[in-house]
Image: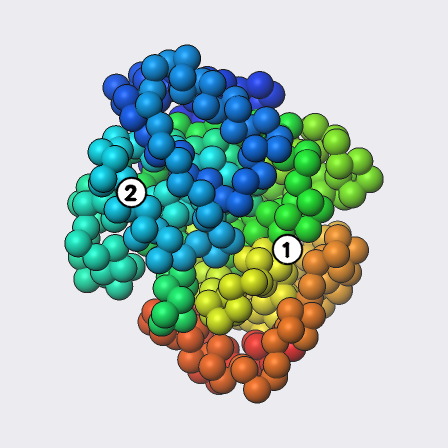
Amino acid sequence: MDNFSFYNPTKIIFGKNTIPSIGREIKRNNIDKVLILAGSGSIRNNGVYDAVTTSLIDNKIQYTEQWGVRPNPTLDHANETIEHTRINKIQAILAVGGGSVIDEAKSIACGFYLDNLWDAFERKVAIANALPIFTVLTLSGTCSEMDSFAVLSNQTENKKWPIGSELLFPKVSIIDPSVQMSLPWHQTVNGAIDAMSHIMEFYFLGTNQEITLSTDEAMLRTLISSLDQLAINPKDYNARANIAWAATLALNGISGIALNGGDWSTHRMEHALSAFHPEIAHGAGLAVMFPAWIEYNKKFNRDHFNRWAKNVWDADSPETALIAMKEKYQNWGAPVTLRELGIKKEEIPSLVKNTFSNGPIGALAALSFTDVANIFETAY
């Protein structure tokens, strides 16, 4: 097993009826004024907004609100909100929503101290300071509630790029799986596939990291079986809770221990998709691109892909496992081809070029422009 370091300072409060504790947790951090950052307004309908604001009021914490974070959050909205935080002398960001809301909250938190937020994404400046971040999670999938990363879209330049810093770990995140019972089915599916994809980005670099690999296989099987249970009964709390916790573990550091940082080629290709087509949900794009990546790359670590086939899909080869994987995704209602996402074949050259806009890709195997074009062709 290779050497590794592990660090995660985020406090998680998990379970039913835990959202009212957010005010107390913020107060413990000596914060008196926060910005509530949210999306389109669904938290007003499921009781989350009322629970959050009541908790803030009870703990004598002032707050302002900024709404309108969209899936695939944008640089323009983040910059607008940074100005709001400065004008209102905000001391911390409280993200109430899913991964997109939390990603934008992290961008705002560091952008508060920068002249130009996008310079951090371009690696032109280091992230040296950030406002404290707190989260109340309403959609599991990204693990942004317990990691140090964020992704933002620069629509002017068709770039969907990440940042990372230890300063972007949330201080406290609250995960109440019961509030996710009202989610539309496709959002639940996209979140679970996103979590599975995070695990697989690490997993396929494996050789002798038995504890990490076994943990990853267990999480993959749990995500699959729990989503099958929710397909039968969307109100199954234990299935929701298992998906929520597995999604958090999928990218909080646990799933990647001693796996050299993972590969992330599939995420880079999906970012190209949703940079041009922000209407494509991240999980839906990954549902299309990951099977194609596996098909193209299984030759590079054949023994390990055989292990994945057997231990995750109870299959006798990567080829039969891929069939099972795509059938499962289709049964859940997820797309498995670029055609289903509305992508035209003539777009592939632009998608390939965009994939490389943030540098070379491929850790399991370095991928050329031709390789990536072939993967997109396989996905088509």
Q: Which residue is mark 1?
A: 308
Q: Is residue 123 left or right of residue 272?
A: left
Mark in the foreground, 2 or 1: 2
The three-letter code of the residue at mark 2 reads: His
Of the pair 368 and 240, the residue shown nearer to us: 240
Residue under the image location 42 percent in, 75 percent down: 354
Residue 94 is situated, as x and y percent measured from the top left of the image, at 39, 33
- Can residue 297 be seen here? yes
The three-letter code of the residue at mark 1 reads: Trp
Q: Is residue 343 left or right of residue 323?
A: left
What quarter of the picture does the C terminus occupy? bottom right
Residue 87 is situated, as x and y percent measured from the top left of the image, at 23, 39
Q: Is residue 292 left or right of residue 332?
A: left
Where 16 falls versus 195 (above or below)? above
Of the pair 47 and 215, the residue shown nearer to us: 47
Q: Which residue is mark 2?
A: 84
Quarter of the image holding residue 181? top right
Residue under the image location 49 percent in, 71 percent down: 276
Q: Decide which of tag 2 and tag 1 comes sooner along the chain.
A: 2
Of the pair 181 and 268, the residue shown nearer to us: 181
Q: Is residue 51 left or right of residue 193?
A: left
Residue 83 is situated, as x and y percent measured from the top left of the image, at 26, 46
Where 226 falls versus 78 (above or below)? above
Distance, label 2 to label 1, CA atoms, is 48 Å
